[in-house]
Image (cartoon, grey):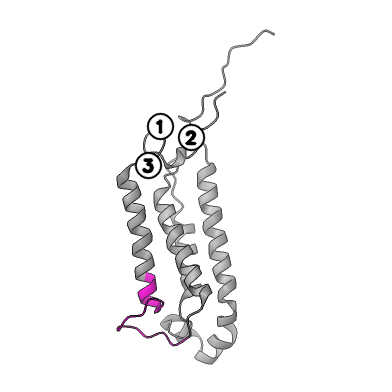
Amino acid sequence: MQTPRPFYWLADEPGDVLPSRRRLATSALVGAGSFVLFGVVTGLIPNPLYVRQVPRTTLDYLFLVLTAGFLGLYTLQRPADGRTDDGAATASTAVGFLAFGCPICNAVLLTLFSSSALLTYFDPLRPLLGAVSVALFGWLLYARSRRGCDSCVETPSTESRSD
């Protein structure tokens, strides 16, 4: 029995070992684009359009980088069975966004809660939300990489062997 090739879940065709340059470029653009978009929208990347009202922390930048990186890897991975896990990826991205975003600048949260409640109760939970987002994305990428590939593993022979 042949063992599965490493990175078969990244390959474009069953015989390929690595993904095509186009898929690599697409995933790099998704990762970089989400980093810039989320960084500008949350004020982690200083810009004249948006001023962050809560101090930036190292954890904010860490969760921004991890979320953008995981989005790029998610785009790069191609599941063997054709299933998509877009719901889990969207949930992880949303939780990650809440982790590194400005809590009192988020209009939805500010509408639901007061700014003092957000700073008192929500702000201390942001590192936990970031950890949940990273764990969810890590699990998603791991689970997608472990799915079987019929063309990558030789099926065992049905002939009987005599020893």
Cβ–Cβ under 8 Å for marks 1 and 3: no
Cβ–Cβ under 8 Å for marks 1 and 2: yes
**Tag 2 or tag 3, which sits nearer the N-term?**
3
Packing grade of label 1 (10 A; few <14, some 14-19, many >=20) is: some
Residue at 55 percent of width and 82 percent of height = 123
Foreground of the two, 120 or 38: 38
Q: In this view, does 47 lie above or below 68?
A: below
Residue carrying label 3: 19
Locate the N terminus by quadrant.
top right
Q: Where is residue 35 in the image (x, y as percent from the top left)?
A: 38, 66
Residue at 59 percent of width and 80 percent of height = 124
Amino acid marked by disc 1? Pro
Packing grade of label 3 (10 A; few <14, some 14-19, many >=20) is: some
Residue carrying label 1: 14
Where does the magenta region start and end? 38-54
Cβ–Cβ under 8 Å for marks 3 and 2: no
Which mark is on residue 149? Answer: 2
Regarding mark 2 in the picture, which secondary structure is present there? loop
